[in-house]
Amino acid sequence: AQSVTQLDSQVPVFEEAPVELRCNYSSSVSVYLFWYVQYPNQGLQLLLKYLSGSTLVKGINGFEAEFNKSQTSFHLRKPSVHISDTAEYFCAVSDRPYSGYSTLTFGKGTMLLVSP
Amino acid sequence: DAGVIQSPRHEVTEMGQEVTLRCKPISGHDYLFWYRQTMMRGLELLIYFNNNVPIDDSGMPEDRFSAKMPNASFSTLKIQPSEPRDSAVYFCASRDNRENTEAFFGQGTRLTVV
């Protein structure tokens, strides 16, 4: 069984400041990790994914995440946020390659609130 | 492609009534997923289909919930009878069968049962 813990339900930050959204997972097998973003009244959109290879993954809108196997973490970072980054961010894990019958287990989400 | 299309976007119904949520996946996608999002439990997978066949419905909360996929371009999630605790946002997502491709989500249906 897998689980995902997003340690912060809400992260307030000022525009142009750096931000880190934390995600820890548990799994007994190899994992594949994802970050999704949900803008107000929208569906979820994939930000980035880690399947294999380099542990530093770059995604859309200037976000990146680092897979740390020893700490079972996959924290999301952005060096300078914009007002438009205000949204809810979800970390998710799958226990197999993202194909076939793989499904995602989501964390409860972190609301990023960017203010001027 | 217009993406995954869900209808209605909002639904308010009275307890005990039947509710039907609809989803049109992206054309050519083999997998369709239904998720429920609540404040308490976050995003939960309810059921998913492959080539119109239900593969795993272990996330369906109880017998009041049912889902069908009569063809490759349409799926429904039905709640009968509805209860206030069913109030949530229900998302549909679809994906093709190539490796390392992500699921695409619809905009969701916000269901309120009063």
Image (tube, rainbow, N blue to C red):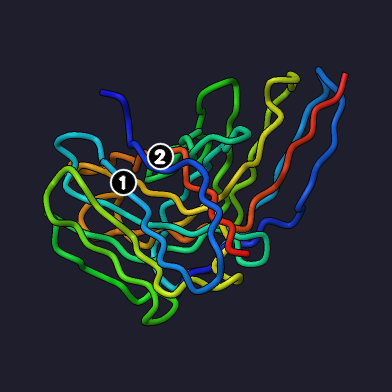
* Residue that mark 1 sits on: B23
- Taking B53 as reference, is B104 above or below it? above
For residue B106, which numbered disc appears in the image?
2
B7 on left or right of A102: right
Residue A106, percent across and down?
Answer: 52, 57
Q: Which of marks 2 and 1 is nearer the N terminus?
A: 1
> Which residue sits at x=78%, y=27%?
A18
Mark 1 is surrounded, within 10 Å at the Cα level, by few (under 14), some (14 to 19) or many (20 or more) other residues, namely many
**Chain label for disc 2:** B
What amino acid is at disc 2?
Gly
Residue B99, percent across and down?
Answer: 22, 44
Q: Is residue A72 visible?
A: no
**Chain label for disc 1:** B
- Taking B4 as reference, is B71 above or below it? below
Under tag 1, what secondary structure? Answer: strand
Residue A32, percent across and down?
Answer: 41, 52
Q: In which quarter of the image is residue B53?
A: bottom left
Q: In which quarter of the image is the C terminus of chain A?
A: top right
- Taking B32 as reference, is A111 above or below it? above
> Which residue sits at x=49%, y=40%?
A44
A101 on left or right of B37: left
Q: In which quarter of the image is residue B40?
A: bottom right
> Which residue sits at x=47%, y=50%?
A33
Q: Which of A24 and B8 is in front in this view?
A: B8
Residue B44, percent across and down?
Answer: 49, 63
